[in-house]
Image: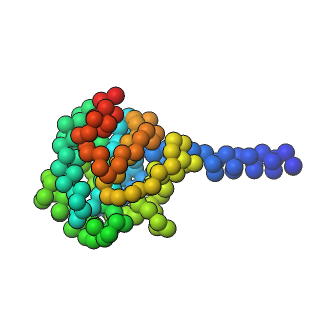
Amino acid sequence: MKTVFTLLIMIIATATFAQQSFYDFTVKTIDGQDYPLSQLKGKKVLVVNTASKCGFTPQYEDLEKLYKEFKDSGLVIIGFPANNFMSQEPGTNEEIASFCSLNYGVTFPMMEKISVKGDDMHPLYKWLTTKEMNGVKDSKVKWNFQKYAIDAQGNLVDVFSTKTKPYSEEILTWVNQ
């Protein structure tokens, strides 16, 4: 009985502390549909927290251009609107979707508005920012348009600052690896 109990504790502990993959998450699209990230297996993913009223909002244009240029090579860009920085994303999901489409012609997947920091941080962003969970590094989302690079196996590879433009040497190098 003691051996069974010990074995059970070990199994639970292993399951509890097992490193998660990017693919273990399901998020919601901007129109409320489930979007299992497991459908992106084999693709590189650039996760970006976005905002419509930010000085970096014009990055939508280059993000869309990057997506169109490399989507057939296996790149997916996913936008996560967030209102965490100076209320720069005050709109509803419907308003955000309309803004992105009308102003920047966004066709890459946009997810529902979430929180990327604080007590109500979305579980995916907890994974992205916590080394114990992602196995690579701790980070903090410092501003809108911070970018997280996920490899084709669902592993966090790198974090790019807000100021790193979509067509920067760092991002293009990663995309072309």
Would you identify the image quadrant in which residue 90 lies? bottom left
Q: Is residue 95 visible?
A: yes
Does residue 61 appear to the left or right of 6 in the view shown? left
Q: Residue furthest top?
A: 177
Measuring 16% from the left and 57% from the top, which residue is drawn there?
101
Q: Is residue 47 visible?
A: no
Q: Quadrant of the C terminus?
A: top left
Q: Residue drawn 14% across and 52% down?
A: 105
Percent position of residue 22, x then y: 45, 45
Vertical relation: 73 (above or below) 56: above
Q: Residue at x 63, y 48 (%)?
A: 17
Q: Position of residue 48 (x, y in %)?
A: 33, 51
**Residue 140 location (% of width, % of height):** 45, 55
Residue plotted at (54% across, 47% down): 131
The number of numbered discs placed on residues in the rendered structure image is 0
Q: Residue furthest right?
A: 2
Q: Is 84 located above or below residue 15 in the figure? A: below
Colour pattern of the rendering: rainbow
Q: Position of residue 33 (x, y in %)?
A: 33, 59
The outermost residue toward the left is: 102
* Residue 29 left/right relative to 132: left
> Of 49 and 2, which appears nearest the observer?
49
Q: Foreground: 126 or 36?
A: 126
